[in-house]
Image (spheres, coloured by chain):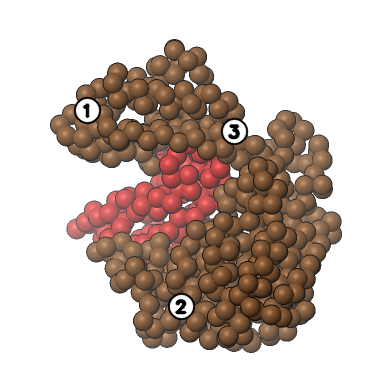
Chain colours: A brown, B red
Amino acid sequence: MGTGAGFSADRLDPAVDLARRGNLNAIVFECLGERTLAAGLREKLVDPSLGYNPLLETRMRTILPFCRANNTCLITNMGAANPLAAGNLVANVAGKLGLQGMRIAVVTGDDVTDLLNDNTRLFEPGCTLKDFEQPVVGANAYLGAEGIVQALQQKADVVITGRVADPSLFLAPLQHFFEWQYNDWMRAGAGTMIGHLMECAAQVTGGYFADPGYKNVDDLVSVGFPIAEVQPDGTAIITKLTGTGGCVDLRTVKEQLLYEVHDPARYLTPDVTADFSSARLNSEGVNRVSISGAHGTERPQELKVTVAFDGGFLGEAELSYAGPGAEERARMANEIVDERLRHVHGIRTTLRCDLIGVSSLHHTLGQYEMGSKDVRIRCAIRTPDRNEAENLLWEVESLLCCGPAGGGGYRGNIQSSVLTYSTFVDRAQISPRLDILDV
Amino acid sequence: MTQRIPLREIAHARAGDKGNRSNVSVFAFDAKHYSILVDQITPERLKQTFGALFTGPIQRYLLPQLSGLNFVLDEALEGGVNESLNLDSHGKSWSSLILSLEIELP
């Protein structure tokens, strides 16, 4: 099995390479994060025929011929907020490519907006939906492997889903090919660990890892995406194609094993309560790491649901100062923007003003050493009122003539934004639905 | 004689996010340094050093066979990916923050 994408905007050429010469039974494109599902929901609000991954058509047009030639099934959550529209698009693309007989399955059932009510409890704000007083944009439950397994049993060549837990996209083909029962918790735990290692693509093959002088990685320009050679007992080797860049070693696999994990002994997915705490990793030669030792116990009774709300607008504006006194001039510029927003425009919304080059990402904790001579101010506001965001952009741009000396390179951007919170729904209330489209 | 060096010299780290909760895993490059990490990179120390950013409780999980520690940082993402005003709304750079800590090498 191989990974064709680890996030919505991931590269295409490593996926093509894998589909072409990876000798794969399955290739999985994981393209749906908390941020990207929110983006899909927002797009669907504007145009009900959209809401799926914007790269879907490009990816399918390029990959499907190799999947057909090599008998590789393709599984993806690129359906995002609109899996049925995505399925129809894929069927259309396959038809145009002349891939007669290709079977596309669409798994839905993750949209649980109808199951919410006034008493639904939102975690993080820690209140009920009624008390939150904001209109819901969408609510999606994390489905497990079940719907995908059903699709594969019906001989689907392509499986399109919306919100499915990331590792489940990988567990499903394993359960199908090896005929693991859903309640074989040990193997579900093992398959989930493999899926978890694979789900971010290059993050296990040297991406999101290189730190020159400390963690050297060759040729990230052509980093290879991962392959898992899985045995029927749930052990596996993580590797990549020869001739590709990056590396698979104990360090890359360890980092990915705990990526976005809280308690390693209780990694909850819709399929299993997986235990990675006794995982064993072994180096099996260049770019080959074996993994074993995962455990699993019964799956949770409740499924996590992400509830999205209209988050208003995010306005961001930037301007740069360089040379002697750059930091002082940039600091002055931020002070002017802050004061004018409050006193001229009467805006009370929280404003964040960073000094890129001095303190931005770690701004909340203070700043790094003084003396940067190339500083960019970056002012950001999140507001339900678009006018406030426009006023922020106006104030930063007007610094060009009215602000400190030598400001240049203004950029401003306003984007609509979605807020997301979690709740839980009893799994008995949710079941996957399957639609089959034959080309 | 003890030597003070940045954690980055003996360990690597990776940050991830879920909602407003961050996790940062830290691994010793060499297993012989694992016990130093356990002794010196504690939730109390992270809270003391980075409390203005890591505003919630901090939990630590130990994985001795991987020479690794996993920190779970509640309320540490200034609202989370869809809410934060930070450019790094995922807190991807929290790993580098923790690697900047100084440790004492016996």
Distance, label 3 to label 2, CA atoms, is 41 Å
**In this view, A134 is above or below A16:** above
**In this view, A398 is above or below A26:** above
Side of B86 relative to A309 (left or right)? left
Dot 3: chain letter? A
Side of B15 relative to B80 (left or right)? left
Dot 2: chain letter? A
Residue that appears at 77% across and 79% down: A154
- Where residue A420 appears, as percent x and y from the top left, is 63, 43
The numbered disc on residue A312 is 3
Q: Who comes first in sequence, dot 2 or dot 1? A: 2
Side of B39 relative to A415 (left or right)? left
Residue that appears at 43% across and 28% down: A393
Residue at the disc numbered 2: A17
Question: Given contact means CB atoms under 8 Å apart, are the residues at marks 3 and 2 in contact?
Answer: no
| Kind of residue at badge 1 | Gly
| Kind of residue at badge 2 | Asp
Disc number lying in front (3 or 2):
2
Comparing A67 with A113, the one in front is: A67
Q: Are labels 3 and 2 assigned to the same chain? A: yes
The numbered disc on residue A406 is 1
| Kind of residue at badge 3 | Gly
